[in-house]
Amino acid sequence: MWSSGEPADSYYEVRPECTDVPKTRFKIKPGKTLSVRKWQAAFTPEGHLDISKTLGRIQRGGIHPSIRGEVWEFLLGCYDPKSTFEERDEIRQRRRVEYASWKEECREKFPIVGSGKFITAPVITEDGQSVQEPLYLLEAGNNAAAEPPKDRDAAETGETGETDDTGEAGEEGKAGEAGEEGEAGEPASTAVVGETVANGETQSSINISSWQMMKEIISHGPLDKKVIQWILTLHQIGLDVIRTDRTLVFYEKQENLSKLWDILAVYAWIDTDVGYCQGMSDLCSPMIILLDDEADAFWCFERLMRRLYQPSNDLFLLEFQKRGNFRCTESSVGVESQLSNLAAITQVIDPKLHQHLEALGGGDYLFAFRMLMVLFRREFSFCDSLYLWEMMWALEYDPDLFELYEEPEAAEGSKGRTKSIRHYGKYERENMKSGSAEEAPLPISVFLVASVLKDKSAKLLQEARGLDDVVKVNFLNLTSAMPTYILDYNFILNDITGNLDAKKACTGAMKLHKKYLKKAKK
């Protein structure tokens, strides 16, 4: 039996030296949290899942950490609730084989993939030549969490080294930010400072051997452009991996870091439209922790990416186009449409605040960039961010998700025909009742940000006399495919990191959504 209000922190152990990590507000509560018993009771003997028996529980009290991974697979559309145990086993095995095939394809192009190692320094130039300065490789391995050089090496690899694309400052800035995981000066992981990380090797020696291996590969002939572009991303993935959830004991193990790197490397290879963008490691990390099998974690991440980015001209899929967090062009970044939606929502539900922000020069709402880009991973503790995600997904749940991803044409024809409305999440039901089915509904994440702003509205109106009172926004590298922003929460919004209540935020988002639908009709 659970004790009343059992904290969930014990399921995600924090490194003892990280003393300033926000404590979770999420508590496991009997009668509210989806338990193992209630989850198992929702299945028929054949394996059909009555998802309606679980959505309310998740919306009220989240999911017990021991079953979180398998429940997420349904919420994200990995499996059809109508499928049987046998059918899901067949799908699982097929996907594992497919992932293994892609991983082997990547390993043939770059043998570090699947080796239990990863790189943190560039080994190839943009024109497909081997990097000529092994000294930098050594330095990058021994100080992988430090900011890369901004001059010759930065130009050579196309990396600015100044900020990441989720609106974060560089490595030194990350370590010292208020509310960030860990304290300034902490090592990002065991993969830095020359420590042994794999089979007696240091990260610097892995970088050097990878560089030598790359020289050998290039000596056999020029590389395909796709291969070059992919290999150019691999060291950036490595740099992001060693600083992702660095306060967790889980990532003290090299095998877990390597698993995260492998999944992101394989995804970057197969999804040429999106590739890899900074911020993806924050989204993928929970999948690695919750699902033991690497292939299962990959497919859960792949479904999340589809949810955030779904390229299609089909009206039925416009909802997912609206969420194109990582869909970028030369002039815009994917999350831009959500920022525009946030502005429109605020203008409707709190016109005074919207006018005030516009007068301060914040009418583009760039201060919300990070929240939307990585789904509030930096605004909540690790455990609370998982709780927030599953509440959002349960509220937005659409029983057609699996068919949408597997057979979109069939899903378009059958949408809403045979499903009871109770099989839809509460947020999705509100959209259906509003009669706006022909329009692409806005994601609940936008209303979550609006809820945070609404909560701070009085303070913003009274105290904000300039944009710096709200947030510091600097622009760098605006000509790149993914514009780089520095967003430093300041003054009024400074205290939200680690201090937000996920349940309260979701409740507020639902209220604002209902209010917005009513006002939008007028």
Image: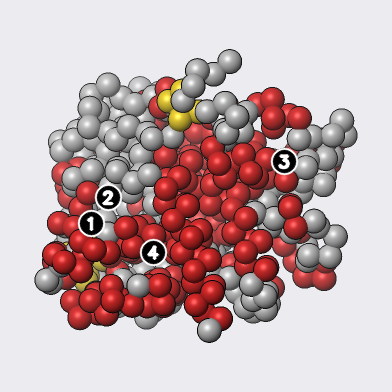
**Three-letter code for the amino acid on which mark 1 is drawn:** Leu
- Name the residue nearer the viewer: 352 or 264: 352
Location of residue 99 in the rendering, given as x and y in whole percent from the top left corner? 64, 45
Q: Looking at this view, name the residue that lies furthest to the top.
A: 1
Q: What residue is shown with label 3?
A: 53
Label 1, label 4: how far apart the Cα atoms are:
13 Å
- Name the residue nearer the viewer: 9 or 428: 428
Q: Which mark is residue 496?
A: 2
* 44 over 476 or under it: above or below: above
* 324 over 255 or under it: above or below: below
Residue contact between numbered discs 2 and 4, judged by CB atoms under 8 Å: no
Location of residue 96 in the rendering, given as x and y in whole percent from the top left corner? 69, 40
Q: How dense is the environment of label 3, judged by Cα within 10 Å: few (below 14), some, or many (20 and up)?
A: some
Q: What residue is shown with label 1?
A: 493
Residue contact between numbered discs 1 and 2, judged by CB atoms under 8 Å: yes
Q: Which mark is residue 111?
A: none
Q: Is residue 517 left or right of residue 45?
A: left
Q: What residue is shown with label 4?
A: 450
Mark nearer the N terminus (1 vs 4): 4
**Total numbered labels placed on residues in the image:** 4
* 307 over 291 or under it: above or below: below
